[in-house]
């Protein structure tokens, strides 16, 4: 009996040890010098632990220790290939054998709490149809209309906030800007009936949902383990449900009406089920735009020279007419579509913010074996096997000193003056804050319009200074590490809040703003 026990123990030790020996001392597969399998310190789960604890920063850590073209990370379920080389990254992003959509399907159910019937519709192609229908709704004339609606809502919010006070003190600039942007985005998506305009607690719910995304994805008793995010999500769904009733379709904006029509075409007809899916649209429309707006505002208004220069170029775009009315004495008309063209420094500040703070992790699922060639003559070939995942960290490429110079970690908008004509090919390849290729973010133009429009309004119509006094520069906080699934880092939570004071500029106290195409 004792011998049997010992024999079993020996077999168990061999069973556990032999694979580890091969794992650690086996040949380390390579494709030339620029691709390497990076074995984790803890077999099979080390990289998982690294990503869970360090989030996006883990990929910066990998590249700093291993500056190679492709790093292969062994996982329990297979390999993940992390591409750092710019040429290979662009080829991967344009490959039709690599797609983002299949990776969204398994996370949809735990994230949104979808029913089996809705999941069946998603597996039948509803997700692809929604993405396809959304793109034209965020381009051309529909985009121009959304821009006008969103910027009009921003103006109204500023007027409401500062109407009763000659000078407004804001203790948390990040939260204040986030609230303004969320209200504007809600108006762009849902029109005048947006519940976010009427109930500010829903904005808190949207932030609670954002902060609890990863806990919801674990999907183990989410009503308990992710209770705050779970309850916030359900309140958002309840608030959006009336908008997606058939009888209410004429009251919402075209973009949401078009998406609701796609839902119904796939048999997802219940207003609550549609609202449950559309919470994701509201989330992606705000989760990265809010911090991007904050960082752009904070960098512009921390420098008097930037404010004055941007103010001057915005003045050249503004058409002013003087007329007396009960509510205003000057009307300022702005062509929203011309801001990026006629305000090059403002646009450069926005792009530099995207570069410095954009940390998108672009993920693709490989549907069939793909060979990526670094050069035209076939050298440095890399086989990417079917069913594996490919990750491309934009945060690494955005701060490469060999691409952006030794000051790559500094905010210097001058590097984007004349973009893209003045950029090198490496800079154009490295700058991917919204992705690239077939899966580039369709909402990037709306986000850009909201940010540029609000900064234009603030520069022309308002003075802003530090809450510590006008002689003090507005403090630029450090950025926290973005969570996996987010593309822009927020201000670090452990630091003091950024407080500012704001008031209308002399001569701009009775202004009516109008944004046109």
Image (cartoon, grey):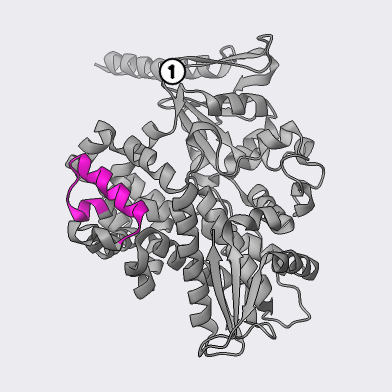
In-front residue for pair 4/497:
497
Residue at numbered disc 1: 386
Above or below, 493 against 390 in this view is below
Q: Is residue 356 left or right of residue 402?
A: left
Could you say where residue 162 lies in the image, as x and y percent from the top left? 55, 84
Residue 259 on the magenta segment: yes
The secondary structure that dominates the magenta segment is helix
Q: Visible in this render: residue 494?
A: no
Residue 170 on the magenta segment: no
- Which residue is at a point 47% across and 51% down the rendered structure image? 141
- Which residue is at a point 79% across and 52% down the rendered structure image? 414
Could you say where residue 340 lies in the image, as x and y percent from the top left? 65, 54
Residue 298: quarter of image = bottom right
Q: Badge 1 local density, few (<14 within 10 Å), some, or many (20+)?
A: some
Above or below, 175 against 40 in this view is below
In-front residue for pair 22/497:
497
- Which residue is at a point 35% across and 54% down the rendered structure image? 254
**Quadrant for the N terminus in the image:** top left
**Quadrant for the C terminus in the image:** bottom right
Could you say where residue 302 lies in the image, as x and y percent from the top left? 73, 68
Tell me which segment is drawn in magenta: 252-274
């Amino acid at each position: 009996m004792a011998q049997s026990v010992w024999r079993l123990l020996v077999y168990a030790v061999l069973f556990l040890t032999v694979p580890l020996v091969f794992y650690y001392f086996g040949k380390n597969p390579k494709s030339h010098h620029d691709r390497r399998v990076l074995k984790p310190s803890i077999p099979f789960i080390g990289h998982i632990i690294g990503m869970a604890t360090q989030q996006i920063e883990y990929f910066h850590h990998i590249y700093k220790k291993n500056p190679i073209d492709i790093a292969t990370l062994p996982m329990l379920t297979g390999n993940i290939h992390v591409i750092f080389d710019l040429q290979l990254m662009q080829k991967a992003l344009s490959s039709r054998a690599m797609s983002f959509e299949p990776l969204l399907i398994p996370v949809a159910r735990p994230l949104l709490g979808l029913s089996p019937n809705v999941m069946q519709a998603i597996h039948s192609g509803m997700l692809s149809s929604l993405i396809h229908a959304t793109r034209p709704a965020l381009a051309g004339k529909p985009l121009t209309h959304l821009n006008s609606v969103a910027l009009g809502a921003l103006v109204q919010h500023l007027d409401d906030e500062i109407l009763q006070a000659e000078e407004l003190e804001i203790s948390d600039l990040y939260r204040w800007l986030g609230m303004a942007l969320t209200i504007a985005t809600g108006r762009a998506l849902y029109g005048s009936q947006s519940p976010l305009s009427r109930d500010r607690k829903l904005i808190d719910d949207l932030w609670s949902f954002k902060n609890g995304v990863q806990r919801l994805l674990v999907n183990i008793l989410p009503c308990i383990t992710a209770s705050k995010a779970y309850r916030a999500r359900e309140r958002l769904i309840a608030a959006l449900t009336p908008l997606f009733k058939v009888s209410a379709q004429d009251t919402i904006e075209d973009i949401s009406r078009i998406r609701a029509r796609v839902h119904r075409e796939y048999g997802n007809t219940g207003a609550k089920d549609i609202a449950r899916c559309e919470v994701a649209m509201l989330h992606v429309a705000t989760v990265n735009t809010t911090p991007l707006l904050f960082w752009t505002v904070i960098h512009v208004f921390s420098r008097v020279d930037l404010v004055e220069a941007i103010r001057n170029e915005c003045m050249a775009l503004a058409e002013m007419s003087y007329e007396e009315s009960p509510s205003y004495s000057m009307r300022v008309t702005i062509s929203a579509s011309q801001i990026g063209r006629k305000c090059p420094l403002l646009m450069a500040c926005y792009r530099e913010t995207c570069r410095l703070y954009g940390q998108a992790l672009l993920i693709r699922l490989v549907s069939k074996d793909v060979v990526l060639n670094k050069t035209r003559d076939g050298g440095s070939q890399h086989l990417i096997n079917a069913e594996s995942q490919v990750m491309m960290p934009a945060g690494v490429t955005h701060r490469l000193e060999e691409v952006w110079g030794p000051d790559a970690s500094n905010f210097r908008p001058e590097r984007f003056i004349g973009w893209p004509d003045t950029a090198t090919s490496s800079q154009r390849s490295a700058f991917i804050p919204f992705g690239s290729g077939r899966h580039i973010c369709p909402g990037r133009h709306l986000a850009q319009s909201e940010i540029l429009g609000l900064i234009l309004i603030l520069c022309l119509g308002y003075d802003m200074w530090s809450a510590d006094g006008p002689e003090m520069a507005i403090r630029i906080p450090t950025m926290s590490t973005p969570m996996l699934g987010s593309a822009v880092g927020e201000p670090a939570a452990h630091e003091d809040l950024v407080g500012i004071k704001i008031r209308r500029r002399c001569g701009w106290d009775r202004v009516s703003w109008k944004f046109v195409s």
